[in-house]
Every structure is written in C-alpha cells, then in structure tokens.
Image (tube, rainbow, N blue to C red):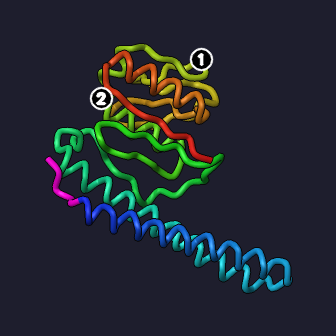
Amino acid sequence: MHILSKEFTSKFDSLLSEIHQDSDNLKISGAEAMLNSDFSEVTEIQKKCLKLQELESNLKEVLNQFKLEYEHPKLTTNIQTNAKRKTRTVGGHFIVNISGLTLEKNTVADTFVEVLKIFGLERVSKLNKRVSSAPLLSKTQQNGYQTQRKIDNWFITTHISKSSASKILNEISKELNIPIKINMAY
C-alpha cells in the first residue's frame, strides 16, 4: 500500500537535497571565515549548519516513520523512534534498506538497533549471534566494557564497527530470509 505519490516523494527528495546543498555552502563559508580569522562568524555559521543538519535528519525521520505507519503497518509495532537523542557521528553514514524502508539514524549503533527491531528481537536472539565476544542479544546485562542498550527487556550489544554491523545484519537477513541492502557512504 503506497500513500505517497511519486511527485510528492520527488519534491521531498528535492527539498532534502536543497537543505544538504545549503549546509555544504555554509561549510564553505565557514572555511573562508576561518581563513580570515573571523571566529565569531565561524561560530555563527557552525550553529546554522548544525540547525540545517538537524532539520534534514528530522525530516528524514518523519518521512520514514510515516512510511512505517502507513505503508508498512505491521513493522511499526517493533519500532520506537528516539528523535531527541543526539550523539556523535563517526565515519560517514550507515544506511539500510529493508522492505522498501530506508533507515538512517545519527549513529551506526542507532541504525543497527532499529534494523534489529524490524527483524524482531526474539527471532534474532534465537540465532545466538555474538559481538566482540558478548552476546548480540541477552536478557541480562553483560559485565565489562561492552556498550549495551536495553530495548523491550533485551540488552543489545552496540559496541560495533560499521563493517561488523554490516556483516552481522547481512548474516541475520540471510538466516531469517529478509532481504536488506546496506549502503556505507562516507
């Protein structure tokens, strides 16, 4: 069931592209201000750039949530958005396409967790996957340095690199017979 027309989707993509282009232009202006040692201007440009990036991220998340709720209603029961959470981004983007849905969160860990929730945490736990010598999913928190996130009574190990996350998600998708496509843009 598709609610959004191709024309709407095209215009929305154009809007996101324009926001991204404006953000790039601001970065260039910031570099010029930096060369001119105008640090107050650099600070203002950085604030504007962050606001544009936040707008772009929020728009993508709203569209993805809309698609989940109205085009993939059976998937929404497994997904809880956490749009307010802001964390660092390292090494580019980690984008996963699953069932016609594009997932791209602020961090690799956020995207990784969202995909696992779509797969179904109970189903994934039965595969007994391990990450950095810790269980990928466990009902009890692991001791040590492992970064874990608690979702629906499950502790998900999120101390994972982009390439490891890609490898694990591809393995899980094959074992559960759920096709996915992963794009690791830099």
Amino acid identity at mark 1? Ser
> What residue is shown with label 2?
120
Mark closer to the chain start, 1 or 2: 2
Q: Residue at x 25, y 59 (%)?
A: 6
Q: In this picture, which residue range is highlighted in magenta?
A: 1-5
Say if mark 1 contacts mark 2, CB within 8 Å: no
For marks 1 and 2, give the one nearer the viewer.
2
Q: Is residue 9 magenta?
A: no
Assign a secondary structure to mark 1: loop
Residue 142 image offset from top left, x and y in percent: 53, 24
Q: Is residue 3 magenta?
A: yes
**Outermost residue toward the left in this view:** 1
In the picture, the disc for residue 133 is 1
Residue 56 image offset from top left, x and y in percent: 46, 66
Nearer the observer, 11 or 72: 11
Residue 100 image offset from top left, x and y in percent: 30, 42
Q: Residue at x 57, y 70 (%)?
A: 50
Residue 54 sits above or below residue 93 on the image: below
Dominant SS of magenta comes to: loop
**Alpha-carbon distance for marks 1 and 2?**
22 Å
Residue 96 image offset from top left, x and y in percent: 43, 40
Q: Residue at x 37, y 19 (%)?
A: 125
Amino acid identity at mark 2? Gly
Q: Residues within 10 Å of mark 2 (few under 14, many from 20)?
A: some
Residue 14 sits above or below residue 39 on the image: above
Q: Is residue 111 left or right of residue 40?
A: left
In the picture, the disc for residue 101 is none
Q: Residue at x 16, y 56 (%)?
A: 3
